[in-house]
Image: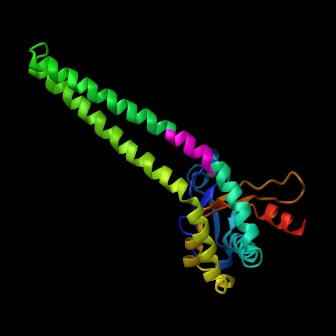
Amino acid sequence: MFSGLVYCADCGARMHYNAKGNRREDQAFFECGTYHKRRNHCSAHYIREAALRQIVLKHIQAVTGCILFHEDHFRRVMHEQQKARSQEEIRSLKKRLERAEKQIAELKRLFMKIYEDNAAGRLNDERYEMLSTACETEQRQLEAEVIRIREAIARQEQQAESLEQFIRRIKDRAMEIDHLDGTILHELIERIEVGAPDKSSGRRVQHIHIRYAGIGFIPIHELTERETA
Ligand SMILES: [Zn+2]
């Protein structure tokens, strides 16, 4: 049910799911994929599937409650968070776009120059072929890059739309969320990162970071604190 969603927070590897043999279903667990292959390259990040399911379910329920009872508040907090991150992201994307477009213009000038040199006999055909092929290849790569950057900018600019979509999805699903299944999980969540357990306080503390589809991290503590304040 968590297939493809759970990652190690430290090395970024997908967590390995262990449910084989005669192990009872409630004993199924995840461990870091890197650790599973080579013990000394990361730590286990062990978490039982049942425990993870509880944590994720509780988080989704908290988000759902927040949306059902304090929709405007939720929208405002998430919007602020998105705006701050998005403006920074858009600025850096636009810089990359400008750079790629400048490089394309330079390549076109270079191409004109070698074309003229060849026509005037200053550059032999063999050299001309080689240089023009190199120019074309680079230009194609840059143009593909420009398309990717433009799409990324459009995605950033559609974030308000993604937020509305997410709110609608939660409201539609609110009744079914009690019996969390794979479909709902994949519809709502993009990625779950499991931290290493920390026992320094005397009890086992493990951080689970949930990224929701289209909107990312939801600061649920901050949301509920501000509600009660
Ligand atoms: Zn790891």
Image point 27% across, 25% down: which residue? 109
* Front residue of this view, candidates 160 and 197: 160
| Picture quadrant where residue 177 is located | bottom right
* Front residue of this view, candidates 79 and 56: 79
Q: Is residue 211 above or below residue 151?
A: below
Q: Is residue 151 left or right of residue 162?
A: left
Where residue 208 sits: x, y (%)?
Answer: 71, 60
Q: Is residue 119 above or below residue 25?
A: above
Image point 30% across, 28% down: which residue? 107
Which region is colored magenta?
A: 86-94
Image point 21% across, 21% down: which residue? 113
Tell me the quadrant of the picture where the N terminus can be found: bottom right
| Picture quadrant where residue 223 is located | bottom right
Where residue 42 sits: x, y (%)?
Answer: 64, 48
Residue located farthest toward the top when viewing the structure as drawn: 122
Image point 44% across, 48% down: which residue? 150
